[in-house]
Image (spheres, grey):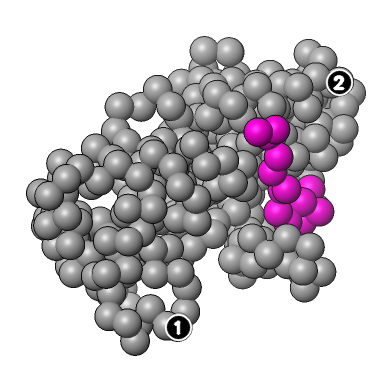
Amino acid sequence: MPYAHQPVLLAEVVRYLEPQPGEIFVDATVGGGGHSFAIVPHLLPGGRLLGLDRDAEAVQAAKERLAPFGEAVEIIEGNFKDLDVILASRGIGGVDGLLLDLGVSSYQLDNPERGFSYQHEAPLDMRMGRNGDLTAATLVNTWPEERLAQIIWEYGEERWARRIAACIVAARQREPITTTTRLVEIIKAAIPARARRSGHHPAKRTFQALRIAINGELDALKTVMAKLEQILNPGGRVGVISFHSLEDRIVKNAFQLLSGRCTCPPDLPVCICGRRRVLEPITHKPVTPSTAEIAANPRARSARLRVARRVLKEKDGE
């Protein structure tokens, strides 16, 4: 199927990240290139954009979409947790803008063969990069029950995590679980009927949890947040679009930590925590989609954009 993905909060990303001629930007989750297509014209003349994605199909789609910008754009297959290494390999000491659009893309959800959706019959896969060894099928058929329950609870915030994990283990003992529809049937059977009748699709939280675990999404986000000081040039902006509370909490906490807010007990006469001011918030609360955008793209409903600016002139002081 053709690669199609509608970028969320597009106008807001350009507004708050403020790309300028001659700057270096990274779209670390380039997808089909929608955000990048809007950003690159603001970087010209003299600017440069690196687009990064774990999904080889997204990389190819972005190359085609952004081809008109020629050498001003480079598209790379890779994981944003390795962004510092990728930049160093290209002789880039720091960037002026960084965008992370987290989660799974519409293309990945809508392409049945990728196995991300609980609404399509497909092999259990869920890998964002197909060169990874761990698939959803491997996870549900081999991981211990306690570990399954833990990730479904932690990454899916699913109240029926233990029941679901127990049902998965019981089902796989009869025969391997190999398709999305079979897993959905098991999840539905594990959740009491009264709980299935309201709220989201019964499999939504479990599928989210499995996807996050398979792709190491939260660990990758924590890793790149910890590298912001070395990645961003002075005055550089970072914007992160998250789609659930687990992601947003990591971004919020990282921005607070790097803002230099003292964490010492209030009764201490002097600060001893040693916090330094590396970032200042540009958005003091998450930016959310307009009513019009949600009407045009319902998947944008849960999007949250946080933006901050690097303020330190030197890495060891103001």
* Residue 235 appearing in the image: no
- Where is residue 223? Give x, y as percent: 39, 40
Question: Of callouts 2 and 1, which one flags the residue occurring earlier in the amino acid sequence?
Answer: 2
Question: Which range is magenta?
Answer: 1-14
Q: What is the magenta segment's predominant secondary structure?
A: loop
Residue that lies at the very extreme toward the bottom in this rendered image? 194
Residue 228 horizontal side relative to residue 280, left or right: left
Residue 21 horizontal side relative to residue 169, left or right: right
Mark 2 → mark 1, Cα distance in angstroms: 48 Å
Name above or below for residue 100 compared with residue 301. above
Which image quarter is the C terminus in?
A: top right
- Where is residue 33? Give x, y as percent: 72, 34
Q: Which residue is mark 2?
A: 68
Which image quarter is the N terminus in?
A: top right
Q: Which residue is mark 1?
A: 198
For image coordinates 25% across by 56% down, the residue present is 151
Image-quadrant location for residue 266: bottom left
- Where is residue 46? Give x, y as percent: 84, 21
Q: State the residue in front, 73 or 34.
A: 34
Residue type at numbered disc 2: Pro
* Residue 191 appearing in the image: yes
For image coordinates 61% across by 70% down, the residue present is 285
